[in-house]
Image (spheres, rainbow, N blue to C red):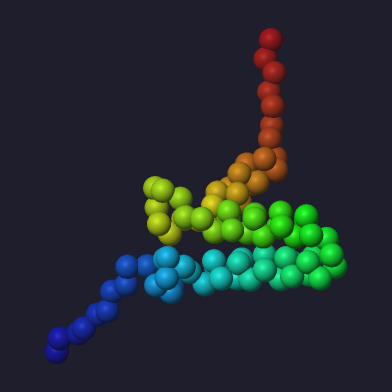
Amino acid sequence: MNNMYITLKSIKRNLGLFNLEFEDLIIGGIFILIFTILFLLKIYTLSIVVISLGVLSLVPMDFSKCNRMYKLFILFAKYLFKNKKYYYFK
């Protein structure tokens, strides 16, 4: 008896449009929600900054189509806020 196997390139779900993943839609939705709330509260400048950061974070990076800028932001924040030990030798 022959078994058939289906192989996948990735376990992440790709929505087909600009290589969007489900995570990208969630993050974009969060930025849109924050923008809408700030805009309705008439805090226009902060709402424009928030939507600009949202658009910037969803820009794909050149070396890989599936990597987005928000993943780079997360890695940078982890690096900044991780526990660092400094040693001084004399």
Q: Nearer the viewer, residue 19 or 88?
A: 19
42 in relation to 83, above or below: below
Residue positioned most to the bottom: 1
Quadrant of image for the C terminus: top right
Residue farthest along the left direction in this orientation: 1
Quadrant for the N terminus in the image: bottom left
Total count of labels: 0
Q: Is residue 14 at all visible to an observer of this figure?
A: no
Residue name at image x 81 percent, y 71 percent: 40
Quadrant hosting residue 35: bottom right
Q: Position of residue 16 (x, y in %)?
A: 39, 72
Residue at position x 85%, y 68% in the image:
41
In front: 51, or 42? 42
User: Which x, y percent locates residue 43?
Assistant: 83, 60
Q: Is residue 53 left or right of residue 38?
A: left
Would residue 7 appear left or right of 36 to someone viewing this image?
left
Quadrant in the picture for residue 8: bottom left
Left or right of residue 9: residue 20 = right
Q: Give whichever of 7, 73 is nearer the camera.
A: 73
Residue 71 position in % (x across, y down) = 55, 54
Q: Visible in this render: residue 61?
A: yes
Q: Identify which residue is drawn at 52% across, 72% down.
A: 22
Which residue is rendered at x = 79% and y = 60% of the image?
Answer: 44
Q: Position of residue 10 (x, y in %)?
A: 37, 67
